[in-house]
Image (cartoon, rainbow, N blue to C red):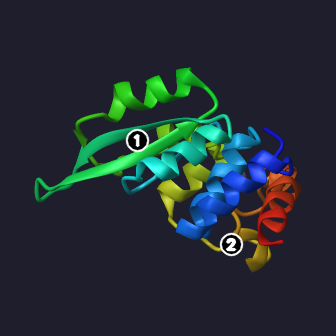
């Protein structure tokens, strides 16, 4: 969906009243710039309705942490296939940060494989991205990344449009 449309703007405004980051993730995903996004909290029906208003499919997924405590995540995507892949792999499973998980999440979240591999080797290794560019990304760019700069302008446009 075009995030500049009136309906989208209404939904995004409601989401940004909950959290700006949530609205930004929803806008990127609705625009097709991220295949799937994860909000690491449950969302109320009102918020889920705004995601649907953007044309997104949204589902809650149950996870556990080491202590056994339950965590509810909300995932959203334009693509039912991506929602299914996430649920098949992660529903009712413990949260883990293994390399295999990071690679699979990176695939679903739209992170460049070069950046994921670098992050697995060394998290937050210095890159040459301006801080204001790195800040609007959800992955840590690898040094000299050839992929990230190709979609940065689109991310920046969505970010700017939300701040208006
Ligand atoms: Zn990269």
Disc 1/disc 2 C-alpha distance (Å): 23 Å
Queried on whether the Cβ of the residue with tag 2 lies below 8 angstroms from ligand 1, the answer reads no
In the picture shown, does residue 159 fall above or below 117? below
Quadrant into which the N terminus falls: top right
Decide which of tag 1 and tag 2 comes sooner along the chain: 1
- Front position among marks 1 and 2: 2
Q: Residue at x 61, y 26 (%)?
A: 79
In the picture shown, does residue 92 fall above or below 15? above
Q: Secondary structure at mark 2?
A: loop
Q: Nearer the viewer, residue 46 or 103?
A: 46
Marks 1 and 2 close (CB-CB < 8 Å): no
Farthest residue toward the left? Answer: 68
Total count of labels: 2
In the picture shown, does residue 6 fall above or below 159? above
Examine the image and state in which quarter residue 81 appears.
top right
Counting other residues with Cα less than 10 Å from the Cα at mark 1, is it few (<14), some (14-19), or many (20 or more)? some
Counting other residues with Cα less than 10 Å from the Cα at mark 2, is it few (<14), some (14-19), or many (20 or more)? few
Residue 101: image location, x then y, percent: 40, 41
Q: Nearer the viewer, residue 105 or 98?
A: 105
Q: Secondary structure at mark 1?
A: helix
Q: Which residue is mark 1?
A: 101
Q: Which residue is mark 2?
A: 135
Quadrant into which the C terminus falls: bottom right
Give the side of residue 132 with respect to residue 109, left or right. right
Residue 148: image location, x then y, percent: 77, 53
Q: Nearer the viewer, residue 146 or 130?
A: 130
């Amino acid at each position: 969906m075009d995030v500049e449309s009136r309906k989208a703007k209404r939904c995004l405004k409601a989401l940004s009243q909950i959290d700006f980051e949530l609205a930004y993730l929803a806008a990127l995903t609705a625009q097709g710039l991220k295949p799937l996004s994860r909000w690491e909290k449950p969302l109320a029906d009102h918020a889920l309705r705004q995601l649907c208003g953007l044309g997104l499919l949204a589902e809650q997924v149950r996870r556990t942490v080491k202590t056994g405590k339950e965590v509810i995540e909300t995932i959203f995507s334009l693509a039912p296939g991506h929602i299914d892949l996430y649920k098949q792999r992660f529903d009712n499973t413990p949260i883990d940060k293994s390399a295999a998980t990071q690679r699979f999440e990176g695939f679903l979240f739209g992170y460049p494989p070069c950046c994921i591999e670098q992050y697995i080797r060394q998290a937050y290794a210095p890159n040459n991205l301006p801080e204001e560019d790195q800040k609007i990304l959800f992955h840590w760019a690898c040094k000299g990344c050839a992929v990230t700069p190709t979609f940065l302008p689109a991310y920046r446009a969505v970010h700017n449009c939300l701040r208006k």
